[in-house]
Image (tube, rainbow, N blue to C red):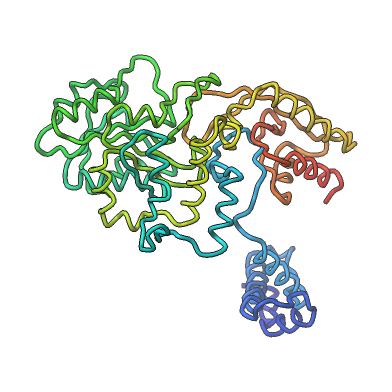
């Protein structure tokens, strides 16, 4: 180590020295001493790393005043929540990285009501004794889907794990090779199956599986027949798969339970809006499968949850599995899910009340009008360095649902003569709240289909701040 670097390391300020300056400045008033000390340690450690990592030409002598500034920035970062609201201008409606489905107003009100005080989570108000948390949503799920019973866990991967463990632990689960999907985040059906204790028995080929393939695989080692809806990809061409109703009939003939994992799970027939091809939960239940699983925060438009529907005897066995307690949902998820389900049950227009469905079904004419209105606001900033134009584009359902079904939209293509598309995207992302857009052909695309409520105002304000150099 050279002498200059060594000398700078020797004059690094002490943590208590930086702390004294921080306390004297008054900028940390009201904060815990623990947080202040940690911020000062962070600052001195950062100075040390800069000295060790800098080239000789960029070496700077560390000072206590500089460390105080770093500590103040650190405290500001710690004050700001890591999980925060962002503006989704990408056109991807169920955006997994951005939290999937936004909740409806009624669900948000339910979260506030239940979360700010006590609740009857496991208390039967009518009888004055202990109750079951599932009772708050079971009746709604049964009424909406036609299933005999229901149970809800924390996500659909958990639902699949719990069903497999209950019905097929130590036995074979028969599934088509073409349905061995990756759920997302590198979680794959075979791996979930392995953790459940079930043994994978593949049948058919990647593109073609027949009923005879399943029949030939069934024996005394079989615990479950499993069908997985390929909700995040499509296979076209020379293909064949067995319908759920045919597997259900096979299961009845052989006395082997049949599971149907829908994945995204939709309670509304989207064919009316020419977004067809996705089986509804009601159809899956009517097919006769013993158990059906799907997500709560995708096409359903609710909170993250794994919903399990099926025959009463099967659901009772699942409820009694000790894993169920480890995977169960909390009061906030229950509150939001119940409120979301009521929108489907009580009203004729859930597509207007559920944000995900509203974004999917909004007419192209309406989206075009909102795009034109927003472009007018952006042009009103009066910065000639910006350019805006309307562009025919496509939105995506996202979230592993409706693969290959683009939704027509009108986006605003934005450019800046003084910034590259990547720089403009970064500056929008660093706004407060962050505006998340996508880059296409050296332009930023702002898709109003995924802007909700007053979010167009946030987009305008973000461009205004960039214009003013903030």
- In the rendered image, residue 38, in percent from the top left (x then y), is placed at 62, 76
Where residue 440 sits: x, y (%)? 66, 30
**Residue at 78% in and 33% down:** 374
Q: Kindly tell me whether residue 261 is visible in this rendering.
A: yes
Which is more toward the observer, 153 or 142? 142
Q: Residue at x 36, y 54 (%)?
A: 327
Q: How many marks?
A: 0
Q: In this rendering, is residue 406 above or below 74?
A: above
Within the image, what quadrant is residue 77 found in? bottom right
Residue 65, given in percent of the width and then of the height, sits at 78, 76
Point out the residue furthest to the front here.
Answer: 126
Residue 26 lies, with reference to residue 425, above or below; the image says below
Residue 14 sits in quarter: bottom right
Quarter placement of the N terminus: bottom right
Q: Nearer the viewer, residue 235 or 362?
A: 362
Residue 54 located left or right of residue 242: right
Q: Is residue 183 visible?
A: no
User: Seen in the image, is 25 located left or right of residue 196?
Assistant: right
Question: Up-down: is 458 above or below 255?
Answer: below
Name the residue located 24 percent from the left edge and 28 percent from the top edge. Answer: 248
Instruction: Please give the name of the residue rendered at 58% of the width and 34% of the height, measured from the top-left corner.
Output: 92
Furthest-left residue in view? 220
Of residues 403 and 443, the one nearer the viewer is 403
Which residue lies most toward the top here?
A: 238
Asked whether 192 or 104 is in front, the reply is 104
What percent of the width, then of the height, locates residue 314?
Answer: 24, 43
From the viewer's perspective, tell me whether residue 232 is left or right of residue 109: left
């Amino acid at each position: 180590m050279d002498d200059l670097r060594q000398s700078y390391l020797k004059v690094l300020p002490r943590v208590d020295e930086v702390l004294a300056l921080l306390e004297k400045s008054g900028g940390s008033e009201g904060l815990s001493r623990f947080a202040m000390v940690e911020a000062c340690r962070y600052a001195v450690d950062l100075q040390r790393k800069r000295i060790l990592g800098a080239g000789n030409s960029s070496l700077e002598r560390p000072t206590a005043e500089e460390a105080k500034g770093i500590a103040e920035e650190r405290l500001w970062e710690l004050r700001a929540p890591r999980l925060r609201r962002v503006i989704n201008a990408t056109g991807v409606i169920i955006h997994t990285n951005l939290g999937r489905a936004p909740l409806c107003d009624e669900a948000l009100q339910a979260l506030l009501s239940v979360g700010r005080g006590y609740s009857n989570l496991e208390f039967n108000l009518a009888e004055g004794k202990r109750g079951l948390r599932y009772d708050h949503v079971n009746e709604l799920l049964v009424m909406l889907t036609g299933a005999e019973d229901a149970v809800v866990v924390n996500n659909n991967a958990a639902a699949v794990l719990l069903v497999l463990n209950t019905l097929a632990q130590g036995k074979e689960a028969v599934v088509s090779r073409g349905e061995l999907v990756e759920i997302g985040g590198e979680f794959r059906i075979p791996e979930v199956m392995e953790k459940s204790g079930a043994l994978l028995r593949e049948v058919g080929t990647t593109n073609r599986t027949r009923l005879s393939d399943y029949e030939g695989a069934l024996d005394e080692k079989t615990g479950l027949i499993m069908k997985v809806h390929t909700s995040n990809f499509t296979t076209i061409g020379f293909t064949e798969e067995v319908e759920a109703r045919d597997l259900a009939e096979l299961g009845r003939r052989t006395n082997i339970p049949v599971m149907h994992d829908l994945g995204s799970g939709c309670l509304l027939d989207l064919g009316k809006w020419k977004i067809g091809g996705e089986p509804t939960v009601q159809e899956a239940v009517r097919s006769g499968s013993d158990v059906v699983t799907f997500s709560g925060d995708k096409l359903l438009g609710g909170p993250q949850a794994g919903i399990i529907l099926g025959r009463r005897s099967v659901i009772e066995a699942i409820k009694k599995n000790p894993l169920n307690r480890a995977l169960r949902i909390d009061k906030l998820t229950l509150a939001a899910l119940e409120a979301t389900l009521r929108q489907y049950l009580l009203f004729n227009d859930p597509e207007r009340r559920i944000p995900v469905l509203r974004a999917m079904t909004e007419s192209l004419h309406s989206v075009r009008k909102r795009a034109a209105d927003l472009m007018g606001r952006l042009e009103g900033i009066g910065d000639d360095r910006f350019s805006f134009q309307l562009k025919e584009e496509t939105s995506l359902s996202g979230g592993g649902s409706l693969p290959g079904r683009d939704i027509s939209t009108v986006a605003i293509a934005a450019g800046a003569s003084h910034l590259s598309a990547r720089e403009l995207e970064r500056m929008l992302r660093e706004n407060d709240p962050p505006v998340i857009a996508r880059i296409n052909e050296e332009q930023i695309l702002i898709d109003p289909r995924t802007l909700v409520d007053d979010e167009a105002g946030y987009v305008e304000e973000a461009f205004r701040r960039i214009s003013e150099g903030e």
